[in-house]
Image (spheres, rainbow, N blue to C red):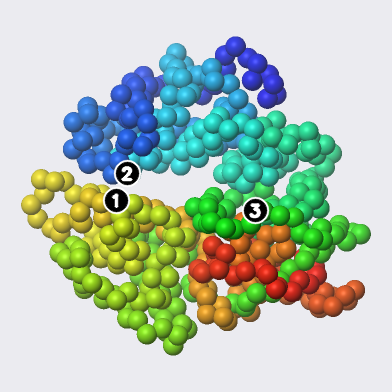
Amino acid sequence: MDSVYRDAGRVVIWLGEEDETTADVFDLLEALYDVVPRSFDSYPILVKYETLSASGLPRHNDKRWRALEAMLSNSWFSRTWVLQEASVNTRTWIQQGSHSIEWSRLLHIILCICAARVDIRYNINLAASHYMAHFCASVIAAPSAWPLVELLQNTQWTSSSKDVDKVFGLVGLASDQQTVKHLIDYTRDAQSLYTQVALTYLLKGEMKLLNLASDPSFSQFRHLPTWVPDWSTWPRASPLAPQISHLRAHEGRPPPRRPARLPTLSPDGARLTVSAHFADRVVAIGRHLPLLRYTDRGIAFLFLEPWRRLAHEYLAESTNGRTIPLDLDLDRDLDININIDTIDDAFARLLTFECPLPRLASDSYTRTYTRYLQHCLRHRHWQQPSSSSSSGPQDPQPDAQRDLFQFRDRMLISCRKRTFFITEQGFMGLGPFFLRPGDRVVGFEGVGAGTATGTPMAVRRRTMGIGTGKGVGRWELVGEMYIQGMMKGEGDEAGWSWEDLCLV
């Protein structure tokens, strides 16, 4: 099918018959295309409401925004099988009734208005179409850079009528198509297929697939091994790999490597034995942050602040700093000299996985986190006040405000569906939603808990199996972890002792 779409003279994607709002929607799309820049770099993260209004766009309560939201919520934007038709041909059009628009133009509109927070300003939900646009733009830009496992990781938001089609619908786009096309067999059930996908990579030593087998409690297949990702569900946290790519540029780190001993499979196909190093143990956890629509005030003071207090409770004895009081007037005095507490600094960095913020040459993660708390106390909604407003608290300066919004967005992506934890050796981190005290922190050979090429993992002892070698036991794979202070190579694998670990 990928060849059919790739070689077609033109691809027309049919969204259905038009209705009374279709003409207005396509007119609005043309107006948006005139407003958004041709380059993402030239568009600021924040756009004032007055700027948008002056551009001739409808007001935020205009019914045309609701109609646009309805069109971009069409089920086509969330289907697995359509990714081929949307990614392999540059002569593709979107059509509804008698109205049409180039797919490349619509991609650009969706990506720009989301990057510029236009969707937030006008209170429209573009989630499905935003995922689709981001994925298709990435594949179009580098079509040969997507092995099947990467495609699966980046399309968990899609749906299909049959669970096996979550895999089969992507094989045509895979750069390793010749290696994985043997998987296409409609006599297989989904559990067998997902296991074979995992083994295709793991038995060759490509251990990073284990990072995708996160939180097995969310799996709809109860008999699926914990080391096999369940591609049919998408309730789990966003994968860590794309979120920590900025850390992988750490200088001097070794390239990804395969383990000295490849994983082995038990005769019944249920247990995978890998080489692992036991690095640490979880001793305390905070309240799980679910994927619910909590207000920012609720997120800040029901989850984040209790997490920070837990960090001080367990780690304060090892530091002599002090915390930043929330009544500090950061807006009035941006140059105040603060002795930043090492715990608060590590905690604020953890919330965004140390995502670079543009203003950090003169600001800090801790100060930005404090601004976020202050903003949650003062403001009901995350919308920049009109410059003509003469009453009420004023927002920080534009650069600080830009950091504030970026910090908030990154924090929500990083923290939702994850659990804050403290380890026995005095680290703090974010881990799987169902993490428990007593879970062990391990590094798998070829992935590593202390390298920039992978992440530490949480495992939980199930039973003491009848081992065939020293240290062999049976363990559940709980999921990947981000540990502040371990992600840039601070923990060196040199000198680690490796032992067999049997994953069930």
Instruction: Name the image quarter holding the N terminus.
Output: top right
Mark nearer the viewer, 1 or 3? 3
Cα–Cα span, label 1 and label 3: 34 Å
Q: Secondary structure at mark 3?
A: loop
Cα–Cα span, label 3 and label 2: 34 Å
Viewer-side residue, 211 vs 487? 487
Q: Secondary structure at mark 2?
A: loop
Q: Which residue is mark 2?
A: 45
Q: Position of residue 494 (x, y in %)?
A: 68, 70
- Name which quarter of the figure residue 347 lies in: bottom left
Q: Secondary structure at mark 1?
A: helix
Instruction: Name the image quarter holding the C terminus.
Output: bottom right
- Is any part of residue 123 visible from this angle? no
Which amino acid type corresponds to the residue marked 2 in the rendered image?
Ile
- Name which quarter of the figure residue 477 lies in: bottom right
Q: Residue at x 73, y 63 (%)?
A: 445
- Is any part of residue 145 visible from this angle? yes
Q: Is residue 422 left or right of residue 144?
A: left
Q: Position of residue 253 (x, y in %)?
A: 59, 58
Q: Residue at x 74, y 55 (%)?
A: 258
Which amino acid type corresponds to the residue marked 1 in the rendered image?
Arg
| Image mark for residue 255 | 3
Q: Position of residue 117 (x, y in %)?
A: 33, 42
Q: Looking at the image, is 158 positioned above or below residue 222?
A: above
Q: Residue at x 32, y 63 (%)?
A: 364
Q: Which residue is mark 1?
A: 402
Q: Residue at x 41, y 76 (%)?
A: 343
Q: Is residue 160 left or right of residue 197?
A: left
Q: Looking at the image, is 293 positioned above or below residue 33?
A: below
Q: Earlier in the sequence, mark 1 or mark 3?
A: 3
| Dots 1, 2 in contact, CB < 8 A | yes
